[in-house]
Amino acid sequence: MKIEFVAPDAAVEGRAALAVLAFENGALSAPASELDARTSGALSRAVADSRFGGKSGQTLDIIAPSGVEAARVLLLGAGDAAAFDHKGAETFAAAAYQAVKTSGADVLVVNVSGHGPDAAAHAALGVRLASYRFDRYKTTEPEEKKPSIQHVLIACDDPKAAKKAHQPLDALADGVFFTRDLVSEPANILHPEEFAKRVKKLERLGLEVEILGEKDMKKLGMGALLGVGQGSRRESQLVVIHWKGAKDPDAQPIAFVGKGVCFDTGGISLKPADGMEDMKWDMGGAGAVAGLMCALAGRKARANVIGILGLVENMPDGNAQRPGDIVTSLSGQTIEVINTDAEGRLVLADALWYCQERFKPKFMVDLATLTGAIIISLGHDFAGLFSNDDLLSERLVAAGKAEGEALWRMPLPAAYEKQIESLAADMKNIGGRPGGSITAALFLQKYVNGLPWAHLDIAATAWRKPSTQPTTPEGATGYGVRLLDRLVRDHYEG
């Protein structure tokens, strides 16, 4: 699909759909009012004869109105005109695409004239994010179910400025798509070694990628991570991604760490069969970190950033880790494995320790589809935030709000550590059902060595079925890429 920025009066070829804004109480935007005049009041009559009130999310589709060559005109509600911002532009354009993507129209014109180049740039981002499909394994899909839109024109007052403003957003979309592709892949395709190979290919953007195999990790002493993967015939991997975009390439970096369990059966503590197919996306944290690094390199972020991915499969082989086993982590701390389905924290324990010990970053943020408990706590619209640093937490929450990837800060009460005390080792890997996402975060905190750190439990947000946002098709969301890109852009670029 091709996206272009054009003047509002640009000629349109093909079967076109025109999308224009309306605000609360049915107030038409200037482009919509102009169209209304050209159609002898067809738009205003349609509004008067419907329940369309211009509220955010409302759509009114007017088929073949006289006075314009377009096959249809879409009025899309945007709420309060005074509050219309870049998120509103994204939502408007994405909703327009979703409304006509399989309609038979091959051109979509999204008119955001009067709202500046940034709104136009974000409208293009909204369309691109909405257009994502993971269809590489579909071989018999009927033509009528495939998108018909081939060309999107963003009509705006300054196409040149809009195109320039869109360039970093296009790189951001590349990162989101890279994450969505990784998370969508089935586990028979995307095992740890294949994941690592795909990340290695990002070196074309200027990233440096190191891949540590099991021999390397065993030599280092990563007993926690290796214990998770020992039941799989696929070799576990630790991927280290470097982006050196600051003026001083040796300056202290910031770091992001992702849990990458490419498939999670639960191991010997086997999960129920119902829904187990979804565990292909238990590598959503690592997917988000990989997508973030892709986006940062694509837009040439002026920061030094480290990304670390712990990639394993958790399988119930005869050599698999057993409940009751005790492993020694890279930190030297020992862990009694009570439940082999609490495996992501074991992967992160070694990855976090390795990160802080080798790179000594300003802070670390880890992302993980870690606990079902966070879904019970927060539902599907928030990821859980746990942190030992107030400033980092405030910045993460603000970045999430700005990008529409919501976070809710959760407590880290020291008293709950009693739940993960072990009779035989330094700690247990699980503390029971009460406060399960909290005790998981307290476990991880033991491996950050006092460094400023935040843990994002994205179990509720990495995958959506059904989707509730027009910019996020059903399935992999790419959650975390936009949030963390915004964090870096707002606070850590020199």
Image (tube, rainbow, N blue to C red):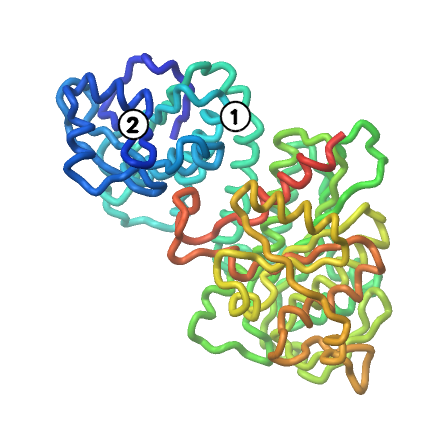
| Quadrant in the picture for the N terminus | top left
**Residue 136 visible somewhere in the drawing:** no
- Earlier along the polypeptide chain: callout 1 or callout 2? 2
Which residue is found at the position 58% from the left and 46% from the top? 400
**Residue 41 visible somewhere in the drawing:** yes
For residue 136, which numbered disc appears in the image?
A: none
Answer above or below: position of 321 versus 473. Answer: below
Q: Residues within 10 Å of mark 1 (few under 14, many from 20)?
A: many
From the image, state whether disc 1 or disc 2 is nearer to you.
2
- Dot 2: what SS? strand
Q: Percent from the top left, x then y, of residue 208?
A: 73, 39
- Count of labels in the image: 2
Q: Which residue is mark 2?
A: 28
Which residue is found at the position 57% from the left and 42% from the top? 482
Q: Quadrant of residue 265?
A: bottom right
Q: Percent from the top left, x then y, of residue 27?
A: 30, 30
Relative placement, left or right, of 337 versus 401 is right
Q: Residues within 10 Å of mark 2 (few under 14, many from 20)?
A: many
Q: Amino acid at mark 2?
A: Leu
Identify which residue, 403 or 352, lies in the foreground: 403
Q: Percent from the top left, x then y, of residue 428?
A: 74, 78
Answer above or below: position of 48 versus 447. Answer: above
Which residue is found at the position 81% from the left and 72% from the top? 328
Relative placement, left or right, of 68 versus 30 is left
Which residue is found at the position 73% from the left and 70% from the top? 413
Identify which residue, 84 or 347, lies in the foreground: 84
Identify which residue, 20 or 24, lies in the foreground: 24
| Quadrant in the picture for the C terminus | top right
Q: Amino acid at mark 1?
A: His
Q: Which residue is mark 1?
A: 166
Relative placement, left or right, of 215 versus 38 is right
Answer above or below: position of 228 versus 470. Answer: below
